[in-house]
Amino acid sequence: MQPAAGTVTRAIVSFLFFPPLAVPALVYALKANRLVELGDPAGAQTAAAESKKWSKLALIIGTFMWLALVCCVGALAAGVYSSTR
């Protein structure tokens, strides 16, 4: 039984989006894997659910922050471009 399948990968990918929330995602993912090895499927399932929650938050917040950054840089570039014309 492997209830924690993909949790570590999801946590590592969320580091690209918003690292502060990816840290707890990775911690819970590693805990879930350890609990699977120890034979505690209920604990592993709970830890995997927590990891998934933190990964989703990191992805959502990170996506909005990256979009905001792109919009700000685009607006700045448009302002610079229009002032030089």
Image (cartoon, rainbow, N blue to C red):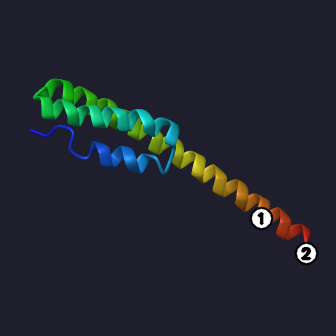
Q: Position of residue 46 (x, y in %)?
A: 24, 26
Query: With respect to residue 26, does 78 lie above or below?
Result: below
Mark in the foreground, 1 or 2: 1
Q: Which residue is mark 2?
A: 85
Query: With respect to residue 18, does 40 lie above or below?
Result: above
Residue at the spot 38% in from the left edge and 48% down from the top edge: 12
Query: With respect to residue 63, does 46 lie above or below?
Result: above
Q: How many marks?
A: 2
Asked which secondary structure carries label 2, the reply is loop
Asked which secondary structure carries label 1, the reply is helix
At label 1, the amino acid type is Ala
Q: Mark 1 Cα within 10 Å, few/some/many (few <14, many 20+)?
A: few
Q: Position of residue 45 (x, y in %)?
A: 20, 30
Marks 1 & 2, CB-CB < 8 Å contact: no
Q: CA distance from mark 1 to mark 2?
A: 13 Å
Question: Would residue 46 appear left or right of 37 to someone viewing this image?
Answer: right
Q: Which residue is mark 1?
A: 77
At label 2, the amino acid type is Arg
Question: Would residue 68 appear left or right of 25 to someone viewing this image?
Answer: right
Identify the image quadrant of the C terminus.
Answer: bottom right
Residue at the spot 14% in from the left edge and 40% down from the top edge: 2
Q: Position of residue 4 (x, y in %)?
A: 21, 39
The numbered mark, 1 or 2, whose residue comes first in the sequence reads 1
Q: Position of residue 26 (x, y in %)?
A: 37, 38
Question: Would residue 79 appear left or right of 18 to someone viewing this image?
Answer: right
Residue at the spot 75% in from the left edge and 59% down from the top edge: 75
